Image: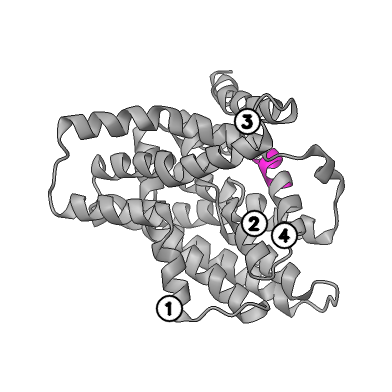
Amino acid sequence: MSLALSVLPLVFLIGLGYLLSKTRMIPPADWKGIETLSFRVLIPAVLIQTILKTDLSSGQFGGVGLALLGTWAVIATLAFSLRLLPVARLGNPGFTTLFQTGTRWNAFIALAAAEQFTGASGLAVMAVAIALLIPLINVSCIIVLSAFGPTRIGPVGVVWVVVRNPLVQACAVALTLYFAGVTLPVPVAETLDMIGRGALALGLMAVGAGISLRRLARWDWKVATALILRPVLAPAVFAGFAAVIGLDAVQTLAGVLVFAAPAAANGYILARQMGGDAGLYTDVLTWQTILSIVVLPFWAALLLG
């Protein structure tokens, strides 16, 4: 019962965002500003604060890092292998979108779920996941879109897109301060704490605002394939790596949340800009978001009892 109650705040916040959007109490144009604020300011503040408070020694998180990278490699390979399927209707735009929705993850939902289910220990794993995976995911997705889309971006363009990512920038700043042994002044630390209090809630409401129930009717084999990759197969692969490496239950759950969360919304922008199937991305993202509301507490109940 306590686990069921713990997931309700996540559901309520996503539902509140949906209602605020559909009733137009907050106009659609304003949600773009909220998403930008969350992506560029609020979530980076949470990351900086979390990384600076975390013990990032290899002994503490080396196994987690191996499991995260191993899972990403398996899912990325499976997603890329879809290119080899003898299905003429897939095409390059559909293939690049399936690769993106299989490998990207929504930090808003994953961070909120980790905070709700695992507390500070889970947030520390999330910080490690973001530092390791987000640059890797951005580079790989841009390379795939460049290779199989009408838009070509050279190595300099790939580096520039990754460097401009606010989450990557936040991780770089925090890791630099961490390994330099810098302690933030109390007013700065308290400011980050105040910013972080509303960051995850606002991010979840923004996710809810992007849900379109009408798009749930747009179902085909490509959507089904994307849902098998994430959120069904990916978290199971991570759980397998975690069992082999010997991660504890909290570390395992936090890593599972990374791969059970829906794809990140910024992949939709890349799909539009670089010749991917943006409509398919929206369909998959809608289904993944709905399913994650069920999948996340399922894994929490399985791993935490």
Tell me the element at label 2. Answer: helix
Q: Earlier in the sequence, mark 2 or mark 1?
A: 1
Residues marked 2 and 1 touching at CB (< 8 Å): no
Tell me the element at label 1. Answer: helix
The answer to whether residue 106 is above or below residue 102 is above
> Badge 3, how many Cα within 10 Å: few under 14, some, many 20+?
many
Q: Position of residue 50 (x, y in %)?
A: 31, 40
Q: Position of residue 25 (x, y in %)?
A: 67, 24
Task: Depth check: give the residue in front, 235 or 36.
Answer: 36
Q: Earlier in the sequence, mark 4 or mark 1?
A: 1
| First to last magenta residue range | 287-292
The alpha-carbon separation of the residues under discs 4 and 3 comes to: 22 Å
- The circle on residue 278 is 4
Q: Which residue is mark 2?
A: 268
Q: Determine the image quadrant of residue 155.
A: bottom left
Looking at the rendered image, the quarter that the N terminus falls into is top right
Query: Does the magenta run of residues contain 46?
Result: no
Visual colour scheme: one colour
Q: At 62% from the left edge and 23% from the top edge, which residue is drawn?
A: 12
The alpha-carbon separation of the residues under discs 3 and 1 comes to: 37 Å
Decide if residue 178 is on the left or right side of residue 117.
left
- The circle on residue 14 is 3
Q: Which residue is mark 1?
A: 156
Q: Earlier in the sequence, mark 2 or mark 3?
A: 3
The alpha-carbon separation of the residues under discs 2 and 3 comes to: 19 Å
Discs 2/3, front: 2
The alpha-carbon separation of the residues under discs 2 and 1 comes to: 22 Å
Residues marked 4 and 2 touching at CB (< 8 Å): yes
